[in-house]
Image: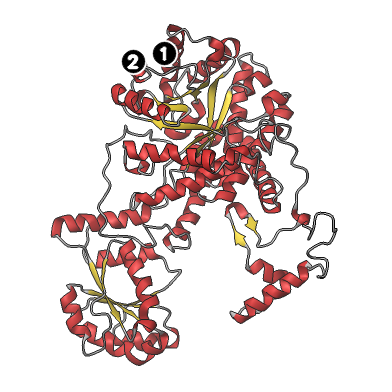
Amino acid sequence: MTLLPDSGLSLAAEFPAPTHEQWQGLVAGVLRKSGRDVSGAAAEDALSTSLEDGLTTRPLYTATDAPGDAGLPGFAPFTRGGTPGGPAPGGWDVRQRHARTDPARTNEAVLEDLANGTTSLWLAVGAAGVPVSGLAEALDGVYLDLAPIALDAGDEFPAACAELLRLCDERDVPRGEVRGTLGADPIGRLARTGDETPGLQDAAAELAGRCHREYPELRALVVDALPYHEAGGSAVQELGCSLAAGVAALRDLTAAGLSVEAACGQLEFRYAATADQFLTIAKLRAARRLWARVAEVGGAGPAGAAQRQHAVTSSVMMTRRDPWVNMLRTTVASLAAGVGGADSVTVLPFDHTLGLPDGFARRIARNTSTILIEESHLGRVIDPAGGSWYVERLTDDLAHAAWAWFQEIERAGGQRAALRDGLIAERLAATWATRSEKLARRREPVTGVSEFPQLAEAPVVRDTPPPAATGGLPTVHRDDAFEALRSRSDAHLASTGARPRVLLAALGPAAAHTARVTFASNLFQSGGIEPVHDPVTVDATTVADALTASGATLACLCSSDPLYAEQAAQVATALKAAGATRVYLAGRPGDQRETFIRAGVDEFVAVGDDAVAVLSAALDHLGVAR
């Protein structure tokens, strides 16, 4: 930047160029004020964030972190995009999912979506959605030459595909104008159900050959990475599994007579988009780079090496409690998917985990993409994250780690063998166990569930969806552990007319106890235990009456450390004398621990504790049924 267009005077000309070491010194100075005596690289490491799979993000990136030339959009290695002009002239394809079993209601929803911004349809067909025989009714009034269709029919895909192609012929749609994805995915079915239905592999290869010959704009197969994400896998594991599944599909198709390039052209890859926006952006960029390498090694030309991507907002991050917050999560996720270069984006409705969405939820879902495209103009910029040293380094780190995982799967015999033998399930389970520990300790907070829950909020009720496929990899959600606790509380409320309660025995003025009252209130509510903070402050002479009035047998002392030293022992003793069966103290007890325990404190709760274990034990203590 210059002061004047022709002055040549830099705004920074009078200041010396800072060095990385100087910045580290400033960081060390700040950390020392908080009691951490570190310097140099250790100071920088203190601000770094550990990701899954051993990856780390640092607080500062410079030009030296750039991994190399990422190429140009539309050219190998396709990191910056599969086409030179971006996914589409008007932004990405807005693909709405429909999974109702009633063809008439499906048709009503489909037409409403297409009239209000949706540009393609993702239809569950067969056991998971509308019957194959009802496909014609579900698509009545839909211009099949204008609205691409993506099918999701499980092991019924041969019949579903045949019916869709019959409808196209019946409605005189030129075969060169039929677009979409037929959704054949034998490997994805194996991942979800553990079952390999005989003949599906051959049927998928035959379908791909027909599409290659007769339907140039139609893809036959999906390489679906969602089962691995939904089983708790990391971004690296999702990428590696998608590569291995894609290679297995290439082997099937080339064995059936297709060239490598033609086989690549029959695949669409499906990935999860999460509210970790930078990780999602980097994952989609890394996926294109990785697949370009696979295609290159296989002998495919540029036309086959560009990966086509369908991004779906993560169901793992969606919550059943306070589902309205899901709108924010899906907004960030869809933004990341678009910025990351996905060709198609599906925003799952905010009530997705509760059942089938209503019209309002579908409207919010499709409008999320519309606002990002039409009002924020994200579709007008190709690879907006490109050139960011952070994103480029993260993309490179993901690519290398995913390639190593992909190679391990290949050494184990490929994707099918790794699924059958349990290698993939074992690794995903280990990753989810580590993440579950963070969730339980609220180091990965979930708003509305583990942080700032609302016990009095009315539940959102939706129609029951068709049963999901089971028998293979599990399906997990971030709120699973807390949802189980809340469900116990709900059942207790239904049977007794009241929720389990805890008295927040706050000592001293608000300035002394507010922080820990807020902490304790969030903690107990996240387990379905209703906090009672009345009166606002208590002491050893008033706490017995407060406990009786609250109707609680649990109590939690909340105040500052100095006031604990003065009053906690006496108040704990008074609580036990008044009938409290379990007394908690919010905070670390320090050298007062034994004194507090002798006075009647049973447990200390603080930031970083296993909240799920604490709350589960509390409900057990109260006799709340599991």
As helix, strand or loop, the secondary structure at mark 2 comes to helix
The structure residue drawn at horizontal position 64% and vertical position 15%, both measured from the top left corner, is 258
As helix, strand or loop, the secondary structure at mark 1 comes to helix
| 350 with respect to 32 (left or right) | left
Query: Is disc 1 surrounded by few (<14), some (14 to 19) or many (20+) residues within 10 Å?
Result: some
CA separation in Å, label 1 and label 2: 8 Å
**Pointer 1 and pointer 2: residues touching (CB < 8 Å)?**
yes
Task: Give residue 88's quadrant in the image.
Answer: top right
State the residue in front, 328 or 297: 328
Q: Position of residue 566 (x, y in %)?
A: 35, 92
| 269 with respect to 439 (left or right) | right
- Name the kind of residue labelled 1 in the image: Glu
Image quarter (top left, top right, bottom left or bottom right) of the C terminus: bottom left
**What residue is shown with label 2?**
133
| Above or below, 315 relative to 436 | above
Q: Position of residue 388 (x, y in %)?
A: 69, 51
The structure residue drawn at horizontal position 36% and vertical position 15%, both measured from the top left corner, is 136
Q: Residue furthest left?
A: 496
Q: Position of residue 14 (x, y in %)?
A: 82, 70
